[in-house]
């Protein structure tokens, strides 16, 4: 037999199939060692066949079989993804295995166990420790060497082994994280709404289900029930969350409910833990894979359900090649396994909701909170008035008042700082206007290098402004308030309050987020100040107040999705309070109180927001009615980047000239951020009416990639900087 092997050379783009004669134990999916250019390296067996077209005497045999890492499903998925994103199969295969495993740095952990050996127990009366150890092992039957050595001393155990009274044995052990939560918590009785959701999902003939439930509507319990049903049917499950370190409570719940059947795949684990969790899934010892984006590749077989929680979250798109969409991969796996894919969110992405609206996805609603608890009341604070009144601080009058009464009643508060995109756009602090492109209705981005404003969608350039175009005010703002400054102001306003800060700086390191959230949950602080990270699905019962500083700041991000993002953020952050007995309140600070996005968010009117947004997208021809494609060309030498850009541009221009009706927009330009990490960035930006030319765009663009010049394609990129 001949094995077709993809070789795994780090950083290489080699994407050919190499043939080797198979040895005993080689089959598709095996990781093997093969001779390659004078070395022996890792490879993956894609296929076996009877004979080679080459001279069989020139084929080298496979050197060794390492393990059976890849399932048949993986092999098919690898082919599909390589074709979809035009990337080497070796690159896709790397997604399937933890990096540490591929480099062979981790092995299975062995533990030495001690058992009775049946030898003559000839122990001197003075050797008390030996006698005690013998007695102990008779009772226990067997025990780890480390435990015995700790109890009775290493020399006593050594002597017993020497005499042949004890013998040792090597056994495999698992380095399983989060060992604290292993109980088997009972499932809860579902509410009628939750039960109806579970039933609809079971009955639906559609592959993809959108669970649209307001914050606190009990989506988690629906997920847990779906997972339990899959397990009961002898199947496995995949459960994805946006960022695992931000959702410790979710993990805990899963471990409490399913114990060791749940395995966690995430970057915060040690190499050994990752290795073991991965193998527990691969062998079927664990049946539920939990993790962030990359866990969509979990090596489970016979999948009964795939769940993507907070499906709207930006982290579900990979930012490195292959730039896959997690939902797309999950849909492939759901189809392969004949199971349902469940997307859950309180604020579905416009794209997903559109698919549900048009009947492609099943739409299931949980419109009320558990126990009909009201959603928190939102109070709007007009920051323009605060400025006029001479309040230049970050806190409005209403927010200060609410904070005072929240603290006085012994509850907790969350202060949310919306920083995304802020520094790049220009806002008038007097009238709240944002400087926008005349043709595109997206806000302009400040390019400091050229000291001008640019539109990222049409490339138009505008001169810098000294006064606001709509009110003539001269207080234009280019920079945001940092968390540190906010904390300082809070300390001055409320010296007695204990304040915790969570942002990129304070939450660094393994479990950094987790530690801060845990401290807040255990009431070590009264106020938590943070950025986007604190918006995720936390459940803190004592939080009764949420303050949103600069609610409208992400509206000004130069992205067609900025309205959608703002609506999502406000709804998610507001949803953090009033989850237990006491009702919650939200103070929303804005320079633009009449903004329609904010008006919808304040009323928790997702449908209203969606209707407005979708008609806007239709009339301006933005996704989902068009596709934005960006080809990036980056290189350390600007000249080289420009040369490649030209080639890419002319090749794509041919396509554009041949099919002008497929393009709504086509242009090449510098990227807004011209240089990142010493690399010059140029781009060809396109807006397409459909996916018809997508494959050709990838092919044409990627062929110009060289060793020094990176070329990659992004579809509806999350940010255009
Ligand atoms: P969501 O994920 O939709 O925001 P959660 O799943 O966090 O909502 O549920 C909100 C709250 O309701 C949680 O505190 C949860 O423990 C509680 N809960 C959920 N389902 C039930 C149920 N069937 N009975 C009682 N309480 C429930
Ligand atoms: Zn424009």
Image: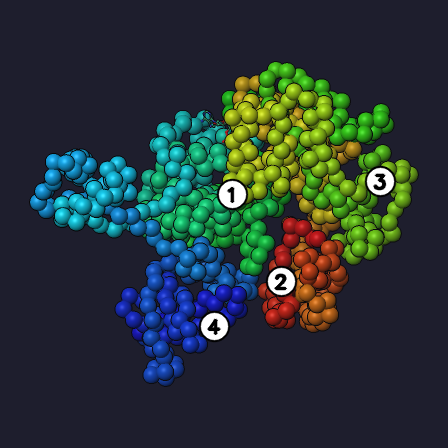
Residue located beneath label 2 in the image: 712
Residue located beneath label 1 in the image: 510
Q: Is residue 73 visible?
A: no
Whichever of labels 1 and 4 marks the residue nearer the N terminus, that label is 4
Q: In 3D space, how far apart are the residues under numbered discs 1 and 2 (Cα atoms)?
A: 31 Å
The x, y position of residue 208, in whole percent, is 49, 45
The x, y position of residue 704, in whole percent, is 64, 71
Whichever of labels 4 and 3 marks the residue nearer the N terminus, that label is 4
Whichever of labels 1 and 3 marks the residue nearer the N terminus, that label is 3
Residue located beneath label 3 in the image: 476
The x, y position of residue 700, in whole percent, is 63, 69
**Quadrant occupied by the N terminus:** bottom left
Q: Which element type, helix, strand or loop, lies under badge 3? A: strand
Determine whether the beta carbon of the residue marked 2 sits less than 8 angstroms from the nearest atom of ligand 2.
Answer: no
Q: Is residue 687 above or below residue 210?
A: below
Residue closest to the eye, 718 or 231: 718
Residue closest to the eye, 645 or 477: 477
């Amino acid at each position: 037999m001949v094995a077709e092997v993809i070789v795994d050379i780090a950083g290489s783009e080699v994407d050919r199939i190499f043939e080797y004669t198979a040895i005993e134990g080689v089959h598709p999916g095996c990781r093997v060692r093969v001779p390659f250019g004078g070395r022996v390296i890792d490879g993956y067996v894609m296929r076996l066949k009877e004979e080679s077209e080459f001279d069989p005497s020139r084929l080298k045999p496979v050197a060794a079989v390492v393990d059976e890492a890849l399932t048949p499903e993986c092999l098919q998925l690898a082919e599909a993804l390589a074709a979809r994103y035009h990337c080497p199969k070796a690159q896709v295969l790397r997604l399937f295995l933890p990096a540490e495993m591929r480099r062979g740095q981790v092995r299975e952990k062995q533990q030495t166990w001690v058992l009775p050996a049946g030898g003559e127990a000839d122990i001197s009366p003075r050797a008390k420790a030996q006698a005690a150890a013998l007695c102990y092992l008779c009772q226990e039957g067997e025990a780890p060497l480390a435990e015995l050595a700790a109890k009775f001393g290493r020399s006593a155990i050594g002597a017993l082994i020497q005499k042949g009274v004890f013998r040792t044995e090597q056994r495999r052990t698992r380095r399983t994280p989060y060992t604290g939560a292993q109980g088997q918590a009972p499932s809860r009785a579902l509410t009628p709404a939750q039960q109806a959701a579970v039933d609809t999902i079971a009955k639906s003939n559609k592959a993809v289900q959108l669970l649209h439930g307001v914050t606190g509507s009990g989506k988690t319990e629906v997920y847990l029930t779906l997972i339990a049903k899959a397990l009961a049917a002898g199947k496995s499950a995949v459960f994805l969350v946006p960022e695992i370190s931000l959702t410790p409570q979710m993990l805990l719940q899963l471990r409490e409910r399913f114990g060791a059947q749940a395995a966690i795949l995430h970057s915060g684990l040690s190499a050994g833990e990752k290795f073991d969790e991965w193998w527990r899934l691969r062998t079927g010892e664990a049946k539920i894979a939990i993790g962030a984006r990359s866990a969509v590749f979990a090596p489970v077989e016979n999948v009964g359900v795939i769940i993507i929680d907070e499906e709207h979250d930006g982290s579900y798109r990979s930012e490195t090649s292959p730039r896959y969409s997690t939902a797309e991969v999950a849909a492939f796996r759901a189809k392969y396994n004949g199971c349902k894919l469940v997307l859950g969110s309180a604020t579905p992405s416009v794209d997903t909701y559109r698919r549900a609206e048009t009947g492609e996805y099943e739409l299931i609603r949980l419109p009320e909170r558990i126990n009909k608890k009201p959603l928190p009341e939102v109070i709007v604070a007009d920051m323009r008035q605060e400025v006029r009144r001479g309040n230049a601080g970050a806190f409005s009058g209403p927010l200060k008042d609410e904070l005072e009464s929240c603290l006085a009643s012994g509850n907790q508060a969350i202060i949310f700082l919306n920083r995304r995109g802020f520094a790049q756009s220009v806002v008038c602090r007097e009238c709240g206007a944002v400087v926008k492109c005349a043709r595109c209705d997206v806000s302009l981005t400040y390019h400091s290098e050229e000291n001008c404003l640019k539109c990222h969608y049409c490339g138009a350039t505008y001169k810098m402004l000294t006064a606001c175009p709509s009110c003539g005010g001269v207080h234009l703002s280019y920079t945001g308030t940092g968390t540190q400054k906010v904390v300082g102001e809070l300390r001055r306003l409320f010296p007695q309050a204990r304040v915790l800060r969570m942002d990129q700086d304070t939450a660094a390191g393994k479990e950094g987020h987790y530690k801060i959230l845990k401290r807040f949950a255990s009431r070590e602080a009264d106020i938590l100040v943070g950025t986007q990270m604190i918006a995720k699905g936390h459940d803190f019962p004592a939080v009764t107040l949420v303050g949103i500083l600069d609610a409208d700041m992400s509206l000004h991000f130069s992205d067609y999705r900025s309205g959608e993002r703002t609506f999502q953020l406000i709804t998610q952050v507001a949803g953090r309070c009033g989850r237990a007995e006491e009702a919650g309140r939200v103070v929303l600070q804005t320079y633009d109180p009449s903004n329609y996005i904010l008006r919808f968010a304040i009323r928790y009117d997702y449908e209203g927001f969606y209707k407005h947004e979708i008609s806007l997208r239709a009339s301006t021809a933005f996704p989902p009615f068009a596709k934005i494609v960006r080809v990036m060309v980056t290189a350390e030498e600007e000249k080289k980047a420009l040369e490649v850009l030209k080639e890419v541009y002319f090749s794509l221009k041919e396509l554009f000239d041949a099919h002008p009706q497929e393009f709504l927009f086509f242009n090449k330009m510098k990227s807004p951020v011209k240089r990142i990490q010493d690399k010059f960035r140029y781009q060809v930006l396109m807006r397409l009416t459909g996916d018809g030319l997508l494959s050709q765009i990838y092919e044409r663009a990627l062929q110009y990639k060289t060793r020094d010049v990176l070329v990659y394609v992004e579809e509806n990129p999350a940010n255009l900087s």
